[in-house]
Structures are given as C-alpha cells and as structure tokens.
Image: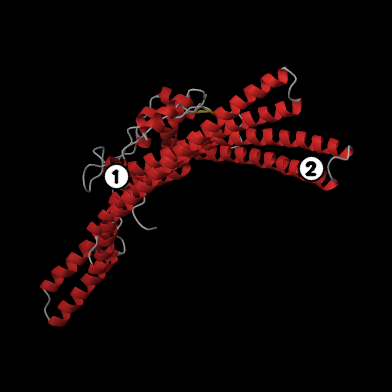
C-alpha cells in the first residue's frame, strides 16, 4: 500500500478537509485489578475552572470529545455513577461463595450423614447462585469503560457524519439545480416538438425526485447534528452550538498501520475478553466454567478475525477514496477544457453548466469518500483499543 498512500497524500493537498488521529488507551496491565487510582474515573476527579468552562461552552471541538462524553453524556455518567456508588459494596458473587464456605464448614462438623448431605446440598445451591452472579465490581468497571469507549466512538462518527452530510446536502442541491436545468431544456424541446410529452414528463418527475432528495438530505443533516448534541449533553434545539473543525488525518501514521502488531494490542486491550476472563475466574460449577472457558478460548480468534476484516475494510475504503480523487481530477480537467471552449464560443452555456456541475459533484464526492474513510479508520482504531468483537455475537 505504500505507493497508494504516497499518491493519496499528493492528491489530498487539493482538499480543505480535516481529520486527526486520537487514540485513547485504558489498557489494564494487571490481570484482575482496578487501576492504581482505585477505579476513580476521570469524571469524579476535579477539573480546573478554565477546563470546565472550555468543556461546557457551545463549541464542540474534536479533541474535547473524550472529556465531554465522560463529563456530560447522560448514559455514560449514569453508568459511572452507579459503579462509583456500588463499587465498595460486597459483591453478590463473593457473598454467595462465603455462604457456600460456611455450609461446607457445617457439613464437615455435621452430626449425621443426613445433616452432612443437607449442608453440602445447600453449599452447592450457594455455588449455583454465585455462578448466576459472576459479575462483580471489576466486570462492572470493564463494562463502564466499554460503554464509554463505544459512546466516544459513536460520537466521533456523528461528528464526522455531520460534515459528510453537509456535503451530501450540497450535492443534493447541485443535483436538483441540474435537474431543473434539464427540465427547462426538456420543456423547450417539447414546445418545439423535438421530444415527446412522455420525455418532458419524465424530466419533471426527475426534478421532483431530486427536489425531494434535497429535503431528505437536509433532514438527515439536522438529525445528525441533533444526535451529536444529545450525545455531548447539549440541548439539541440550541441554535448557538457550533461544531468545531475536523483536524487533518495524518496519513504518515496510517502508512505504518500493521494489523499483525495491532492484533496483539487488540487482544490485550479487549474489554469483552477481560469480562469473560473475570467471569471464568468467578465461576464455581463445571457447567458455567465450561461456558466461559469456551468464550475465553475462542475470544482471541474472534478478535484477530475482526481486526483482519476491519483492516481490509480500511484498505478497500482507501482504494475507493483514490478512485474518487482521480475522478475529481479528471472532471476538473474536463471542465477546464470546456470552460476554455465556452469562452471561445465553441460550446453552449448548457454544456458549460453541465461540466461545472460534474466537476463540483465529483469534488464533493471525493470529500465524502474521505469522511467515509475516516469513519472506517477510527472504527479500526477503536477495535484495536478494546472494542473488537470477541465472540460470534
């Protein structure tokens, strides 16, 4: 891919777009341990006044998304509040195991075989109850981190989609304008008898369809912005909220992407895998142990497969972006030629406007492909950072 990336970097110079790479890591290097801060999440740590003001203002900036989600996303805040409230409580799993140990002790001191059997049965019942409650404060911690990372990723995708959908709306407007010109041309031709009434009606239907597409594109853009505002804890009806600029993606970093190295990181970081391991550690009966042993043993395969699939998607998206960029350059060259011919009177204004339309659409479609690539690339990074699929589901 090296030649492909080098060519892309040259082509991207003509664009005024932006994306950046932000990779957040919550890697837990210990097997079963909360972070050194005792599981105190950043949202419960004090921020200085300047940072608070910056995070709570009406400008949503890309490099603030992680902190904004932690501080203001309703679902994430609720999850961490529940964890913070209950993390020091005795885990249900441990409670049932303690009860099982007590019944085992009573069984050892039983006065009769019948009494021993009764206590052993009660001990086994407590083990079953423990197996039905294998989650503990650590698995809840991993689940909160998992939720937070997914929410951050989804918010970043909404951020990117906001700019992508702006372009799609602009393309829809241009397409509607072109359809309007086609309709006028068809009506003129019909009045002159050079086309049939059916042809003229088809041109009108096409224009009305393009007009409807413009309305739908605007609705999608507005909905995307609303979803983004809700995710960052803002009033989705607030007209004063501004979406910040989208930083430029560093393609030099992308060229160094190595899926084989990333697989190892993906396994080490994977939160679902950690949850499976912890649940296995908490399991007591053979049936439940077998269930989680299977999940743990298969997790690495699923994670590696997901990374491979997502990396291939990154490559395919890059190829698609390259094709769109090449088409944009070709349409720009065609427009330059036709523009020159138009100045000399050798082509009509209608031909000139059509060439201009094709150039503008091709450029915007290339930019859309760039945003599509950004979404796919950030999804890949998130998979490496702990969100890769660890099971068939």
How far apart are labels 1 and 2 at the CA level?
Answer: 54 Å
- Residue 174 place in picture, x, y as percent: 68, 33
Q: Quadrant of the N terminus?
A: top left
- Residue 108 place in picture, x, y as percent: 11, 72
Vertical placement of residue 332 versus 131, above or below:
above
Q: Compare marks 1 and 2 and give the one earlier in the sequence.
A: 2
Graded by Cα atoms within 10 Å as few (under 14), some (14 to 19) or many (20 or more), the crowding at tag 1 reads many
Q: Which residue is mark 2?
A: 204
- Residue 366 place in picture, x, y as percent: 54, 33
13 left or right of 139 in image: right
239 left or right of 305 in image: right
Q: Nearer the viewer, residue 95 or 310?
A: 310
- Residue 318 place in picture, x, y as percent: 44, 37
Q: Nearer the viewer, residue 282 or 38?
A: 282
What residue do we see at 74% from left, 22% from top?
A: 346
The mark tally for this picture is: 2
What residue do we see at 56% from left, 30% from top?
A: 328
Residue 151, by quadrant, is: top left
Of badges 1 and 2, the one in the foreground is 2
Vertical placement of residue 147 versus 17, above or below:
below
Q: Which residue is mark 1?
A: 263
Q: Nearer the viewer, residue 193 or 386?
A: 193
Vertical placement of residue 304 versus 214, above or below:
below
363 left or right of 389 in image: right
53 left or right of 125 in image: right
> Is residue 340 visible from the viewing direction of this image?
yes
What is the secondary structure assignment of the residue under circle 2? Answer: helix
Picture disc at residue 250: none
Whether tag 1 and tag 2 are in contact, CB under 8 A, the answer is: no
What residue do we see at 60% from left, 29% from top?
A: 331
Graded by Cα atoms within 10 Å as few (under 14), some (14 to 19) or many (20 or more), the crowding at tag 2 reads some
What residue do we see at 19% from left, 74% from top?
A: 119
């Amino acid at each position: 891919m090296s030649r492909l990336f080098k060519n892309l970097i040259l082509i991207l110079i003509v664009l005024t777009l932006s994306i950046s790479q932000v990779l957040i890591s919550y890697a837990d290097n210990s097997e079963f341990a909360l972070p050194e801060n005792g599981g105190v999440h950043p949202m419960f740590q004090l921020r200085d006044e300047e940072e608070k003001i910056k995070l709570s203002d009406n400008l949503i900036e890309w490099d603030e998304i992680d902190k904004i989600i932690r501080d203001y996303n309703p679902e994430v805040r609720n999850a961490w509040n529940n964890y913070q409230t209950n993390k020091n409580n005795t885990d249900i799993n441990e409670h049932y195991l303690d009860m099982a140990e007590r019944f085992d002790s009573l069984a050892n001191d039983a006065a009769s075989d019948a009494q021993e059997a009764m206590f052993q049965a009660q001990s086994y019942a407590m083990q079953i109850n423990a197996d039905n409650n294998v989650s503990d404060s650590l698995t809840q911690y991993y689940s909160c981190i998992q939720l937070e990372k997914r929410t951050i990723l989804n918010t970043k995708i909404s951020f990117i989609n906001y700019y992508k959908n702006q372009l799609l709306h602009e393309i829809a407007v241009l397409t509607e304008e072109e359809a309007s010109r086609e309709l006028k041309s068809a009506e003129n031709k019909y009045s002159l008898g050079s086309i049939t009434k059916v042809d003229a009606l088809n041109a009108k239907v096409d224009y009305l369809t393009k007009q409807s597409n413009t309305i739908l594109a605007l609705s999608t853009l507005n909905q995307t912005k609303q979803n983004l505002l809700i995710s960052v804890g803002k009033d989705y009806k607030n007209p004063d909220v501004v979406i910040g600029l989208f930083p430029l993606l560093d393609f030099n970093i992308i060229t160094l992407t190595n899926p084989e190295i990333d697989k190892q990181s993906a396994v080490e970081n994977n939160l679902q895998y950690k949850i499976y391991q912890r649940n296995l550690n908490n399991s007591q009966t053979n049936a439940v142990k077998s269930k989680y042993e299977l999940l743990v043993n298969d997790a690495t395969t699923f994670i590696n497969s997901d990374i491979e699939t997502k990396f291939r998607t990154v490559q395919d998206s890059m190829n698609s972006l390259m094709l769109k960029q090449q088409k944009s350059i070709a349409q720009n060259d065609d427009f330059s030629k036709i523009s020159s011919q138009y100045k000399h009177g050798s082509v009509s204004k209608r031909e000139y406007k059509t060439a201009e339309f094709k150039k503008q659409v091709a450029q915007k479609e290339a930019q859309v492909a760039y945003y599509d690539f950004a979404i796919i690339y950030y999804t890949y990074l998130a998979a490496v950072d702990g969100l890769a699929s660890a099971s068939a589901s």
